Amino acid sequence: MARNRKGNPIDGVLLINKSTGQSSNRILQHYKRCLFAKKAGHTGALDPLATGLLPLCFGESTKFSQILLESDKTYETTARLGIRTDTCDSDGKVTNNSDIPVITELQVEDLLKEHFSGVITQVAPIYSALKVNGRPMYELARAGIEVEAKSRQVEIFSIQATEIREDEIDLIVHCSKGTYIRSIVDQLGQLLGCGAHVSRLHRTQHGPFRLDQCVVDEDSSAESLKAALLPTDAMILDWPRVNLNGESVERFLHGNPASYIENDTEQNRQLRVYDLENNRFIGIGRLNERQQIIPKRVISCDF
């Protein structure tokens, strides 16, 4: 039987261990072609320099990719001391060279605790994907257009220096969405009085997913890729589960409030919703004051 020219209706989440030098979009398009998938999207780009965990969503899973975009992440990074660049990483042009002072473990620990713990206001690198008047800042910077650096609040759940060498510091950072590790490293370098840039960035955790769950590479066959796909609800297995029966399933899937018999769920809490009879995930919703499930995102299903 001939394949659908628009692509196959493949659903699920594929965890990729990204290598350096590749754009996230290039990787996405590669695996979309391998699976001949009709629809695909990634859940937050990694810079070409960066490596590590990159979840890709296919088919119905793309409806829920925002969940991963909003999730926390963990990175391992190396700060190269004595050199600042315009991009705050080793892909940029050197803007300043400085002598490196003697740096102690206690000094670094104190700076991390004082400046990079909890909720902080962070200035995004000029070469970042944040948009100004609808255009990414990196695009404006490359065109020579001056842009004002944008600041925003992010949260650092934990940050630790794992090794300090003469000209490098290794860090592990667990942070909220939107955190720029490049900005942390650049600011740390300035606080140390010598400047710094990111020479290595490796993502090891993204929401509920961990790097050791990646089991495919660019040479994997379509069959092995399909076998490695995780179900859509793998993104939210820590959310409370509710089950619907009969007419309630159809009402929910058509975007209408659905009756919910059990009453042990907090009002307005995010829920993962299942068709109990067929044991299938059908979407996410919230419970209202009338003990009804209000659909927020639903899976397309054949009746």
Image (cartoon, rainbow, N blue to C red):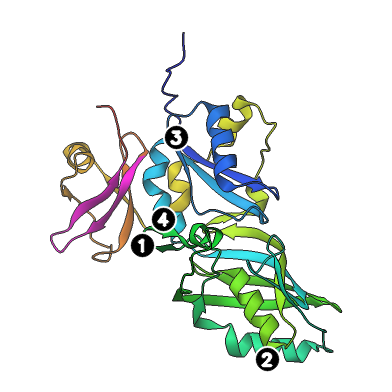
* Residue under numbered circle 3: 11
Chain-order first, disc 1 or disc 2: 2
Chain-order first, disc 2 or disc 3: 3
Chain-order first, disc 1 or disc 4: 4
Q: In which quarter of the image is residue 165?
A: bottom right
Q: In which quarter of the image is residue 163?
A: bottom right
Residue 172 at x, y percent in the picture: 68, 71
* Residue under numbered circle 1: 133
Which residue in the rendered view is the most extreme toward the left?
290
Instruction: Examine the rendering and report whether any part of residue 105 can be seen.
Output: yes
Q: Residues within 10 Å of mark 4 (few under 14, many from 20)?
A: few
**Label 4's element?**
helix
**Amino acid at pointer 4:** Ile
Magenta highlight: main SS: strand
Answer above or below: position of 41 versus 278: below
**Amino acid at pointer 2:** Asp
**Amino acid at pointer 1:** Asn
* Residue under numbered circle 4: 67
Chain-order first, disc 1 or disc 3: 3
Which residue in the rendered view is the most extreme toward the top?
1
**Amino acid at pointer 3:** Asp
Answer above or below: position of 169 versus 231: below
* Residue under numbered circle 2: 110
